[in-house]
Amino acid sequence: MVTAVTTTEPRKRNRRGEGGKLREEIIAAAVALLDEGGDERAVTLRSVARKAGIAAPSIYAHFADQPSIMLAVVQREMDRLATALREADEHAGQDARTRLFAVCNAYLELAREHPQRYRIMFGGLWTPSVDDTSISDADLESLGAEALTLLADVLEACVAQGIAYGSDDLYGDAVALWLGLHGLAHQRAVVRKMPGPADVAERLITALAHLKP
Amino acid sequence: MVTAVTTTEPRKRNRRGEGGKLREEIIAAAVALLDEGGDERAVTLRSVARKAGIAAPSIYAHFADQPSIMLAVVQREMDRLATALREADEHAGQDARTRLFAVCNAYLELAREHPQRYRIMFGGLWTPSVDDTSISDADLESLGAEALTLLADVLEACVAQGIAYGSDDLYGDAVALWLGLHGLAHQRAVVRKMPGPADVAERLITALAHLKP
DNA sequence: TCGTTTACTTACGGGCGTTAGCTTACGTCT
DNA sequence: AGACGTAAGCTAACGCCCGTAAGTAAACGA
């Protein structure tokens, strides 16, 4: 099922000061297109407009051009991810092992729930412009900074509680751990069926966090 | 520089039995477009034809449709990868640790040399048709089978030579190791500058292969 | 010479991003 | 209450590139 012709109910116009609401609706429409299983090629300016029930040029009041929509989607999802990780950590209590698995599993689950969103966040094909470094170096690194610091914290707690071997560079270990998670999350997002045992995630986490046996 | 208008020297036609040569040229042209730094969106049927110096419809003598070109590219690169890994292993001698790093580094280097090719192989956006399972389940799993078996072999050698801790499921460990390599390779292929220390690769390999300190 | 292979020219229809100019209704202000 | 400025969104249209179909030319080899 590709074409779901939305019954074109003539959308109610927003109130005076609330024109900005459409911006959120546009982003939501783009995300919806992704979640329907189509890849990013399905997210064109026109298809987003159709999904949102507006005319294509109406988008230009809220976004400079088409890549900017994708950029907004990525930024929103990045925030959601960072928040989810933080919450998972906070709800995990004090036990370092619990915290570690809570955070890592939260990451993997978010990726699994919305594979296409994840692909776009880290698959990087929405590239705005060649010279636009405003996100790939700032925002991605801000998520990088935030999530990786969190991971490093949890790793430190593991070492402090004696359940993991120490290291001279916990941040480096956090990066390695994240790369492992990313490899799994990405592969799951791309292929229909992952090869390998069911407990790959635990293997990855255990090994990369240097957990004691 | 986006448009490199190739001087349209009126290409010499192939001899009688050699019509199939064009097929290789077409694949090469597609790969060339990728290597020029453009992502897969730059590889259209028409752009490939331009790059190959032929007329667009001439492609249909060798490929059923546009996605089939990408599919052929992926298959070719998959073979190259498998070969490269095998050769790296064979040239590494008997020392298990050397073999392990040789194979893993060969993987990472191939990905780094041709980031766009790697992205396409495992980023999966060239998707031919919804129902075409002929590659994603057969070929990808054949590379999976071949490369993963090789990795498992090397891991086994590491255990046998006493430089790595054993495991009850070496194949599972090989999958985990590959996922780590993939995470790093993919991330490198996507972003301009990787965060984290320079020795992430060694950290990943050491941890995921359970090498003894 | 002549059939077959090899490749080309022309053309159609469609989706895309984007620009220019218009309509409608809200909310304010007299 | 009614006029009116302006915000919110639409219609129409442009040019571009795409994938693909149909018919055509040229050269190779028998």
Image (tube, coloured by chain):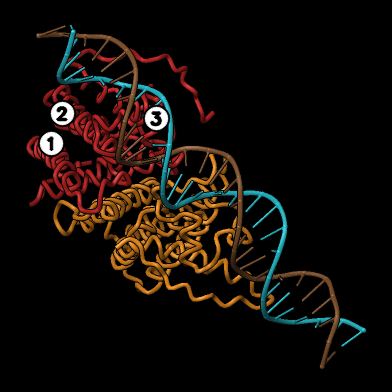
Chain colours: A orange, B red, C cyan, D brown
Query: Which residue is painted at 25% across and 24% down in the image?
Result: B24
What's the residue type where badge 1 is placed? Leu
What's the residue type where badge 2 is placed? Arg
Residue for badge 3: B33
B94 to the left or right of B66: left
Check the image and report above or below for A9 versus A26.
Answer: below
| Marks 1, 3: nearer the viewer | 3
**Do tag 2 and tag 1 residues touch (Cβ < 8 Å)?**
yes
Chain for disc number 2: B
Residue for badge 2: B86
**Which label sits on residue B150?**
1
D1 to the left or right of B33: right
A34 to the left or right of B152: right
Query: Which residue is painted at 34% across and 40% down in the image?
Result: B119
Give the image location of residue C23, x and y in percent: 68, 70
Q: Which quadrant of the figure contains the N terminus of chain B?
A: top right
Secondary element at tag 2: helix
